[in-house]
Image (tube, rainbow, N blue to C red):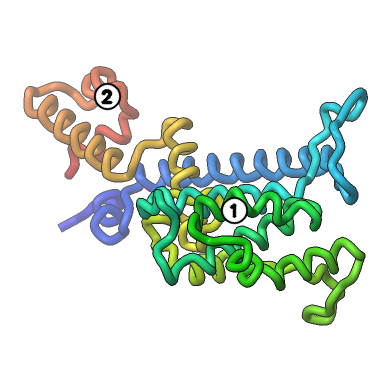
């Protein structure tokens, strides 16, 4: 028995020739999007302004500059802790035995976001949400080391970490925060910044999928079903006695595709 190349390729290869052409088109779309993203990042990098002192209101010619604000991450993480409490239904504060960690972390974030002398004044309202029955002694007992390091940072002191001189303030990776706060994968989906690498990857994939949909790229399952539907329609028209050219014109498909469908 003699087989055409298309028949052999469709039998032996994981994709048909039509599907391979579609995959190549998608890959080119992805490469184009990647180049556009890189160009956008390079353009944004020229607009960044590093603020090393106290933040001041931007005016005049500097009003349209993008400012890199390290403290924004700290505020976002405080927001994540508050959101975590909402998700867990802790409207009256954390249960006994689970208060020290969120209060300590909140103090660390405030030390990143505020001047040292303002940390306690900003922390007290937060403590009323996180541990409402705590008084001044409990708060200070929990965050004394945070305050000491914040004041050391304000004095310009540094500590050595991995061979480099860095701020003495506490710093925590997302992995540490997730572990200490016992954040579940489901809760991570509601967080703004405290997320694992897996959650970050999931969001990236979700965003890219949305972008592909905006560019008209359909899910593979839908594409395969559409291909099956077209093949069925082509065979039905051929069974009615129509020529391949007439079928191609009626279904608005290339003649080669109609030949492939009808040969199956």
Residue 105 lies in quadrant: bottom right
Q: Position of residue 55 (x, y in %)?
A: 84, 42
Comparing 126 with 219, the one in front is 126
Instruction: Work out how far the residue at label 2 is from the one at label 1, CA to CA, in angstroms.
Output: 58 Å
- Is 19 positioned to the left or the right of 178 in the image? left
Determine crowd level at label 1: few under 14, some 14-19, many 20+ residues with C-alpha closer than 10 A: many
Rendered residue at 56%/55% (across/down): 127
Residue with the mark numbered 1:
77
Comparing 62 with 122, the one in front is 122
Query: Nearer the observer, disc 2 or disc 1?
Result: 1
Q: Which mark is residue 36?
A: none
Q: Report helix, strand or loop for mark 2.
A: helix
Residue 183 lies in quadrant: bottom left
Determine crowd level at label 2: few under 14, some 14-19, many 20+ residues with C-alpha closer than 10 A: some
Q: Quadrant of the N terminus?
A: bottom left
Rendered residue at 47%/46% (across/down): 24
Q: Quadrant of the C terminus?
A: top left
Comparing 247 with 219, the one in front is 219
Question: Which mark is first along the chain, 1 or 2?
Answer: 1
Rendered residue at 25%/32% (across/down): 258
- Is 161 positioned to the left or the right of 105 in the image? right
Rendered residue at 27%/53% (across/down): 10
Residue with the mark numbered 2:
248
Q: Position of residue 238 (x, y in %)?
A: 13, 28
Q: Position of residue 201 (x, y in %)?
A: 49, 57
């Amino acid at each position: 028995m003699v087989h055409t190349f298309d028949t052999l390729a469709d039998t032996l290869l994981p994709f048909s020739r039509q599907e391979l052409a579609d995959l190549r088109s998608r890959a080119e779309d992805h490469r184009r999007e990647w180049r556009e993203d890189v160009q956008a990042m390079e353009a944004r990098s020229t607009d960044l302004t590093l603020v090393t002192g106290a933040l001041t209101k931007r005016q005049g010619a500097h009003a349209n500059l993008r400012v890199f604000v390290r403290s924004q991450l700290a505020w976002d993480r405080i927001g994540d802790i508050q959101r975590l409490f909402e998700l867990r239904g802790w409207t009256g504060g954390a249960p006994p035995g689970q208060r020290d960690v969120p209060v300590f972390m909140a103090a660390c974030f405030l030390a990143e976001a505020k001047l040292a002398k303002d940390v306690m004044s900003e922390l007290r309202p937060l403590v009323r949400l996180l541990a409402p029955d705590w008084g001044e002694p409990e708060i200070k007992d929990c965050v004394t080391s945070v305050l000491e390091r914040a004041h050391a940072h304000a004095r310009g002191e540094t500590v050595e970490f991995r061979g480099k001189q860095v701020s003495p303030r506490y710093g925590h990776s997302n992995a540490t925060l997730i572990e200490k706060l016992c954040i579940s994968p489901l809760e991570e989906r509601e967080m703004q910044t405290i997320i694992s690498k897996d959650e970050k990857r999931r969001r990236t994939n979700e965003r890219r999928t949305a972008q592909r949909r905006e560019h008209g790229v359909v899910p593979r399952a839908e594409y395969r079903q559409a291909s099956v539907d077209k093949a069925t329609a082509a065979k039905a028209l051929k069974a009615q006695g129509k020529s391949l050219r007439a079928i191609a014109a009626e279904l608005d498909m290339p003649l080669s595709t109609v030949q492939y469908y009808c040969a199956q």
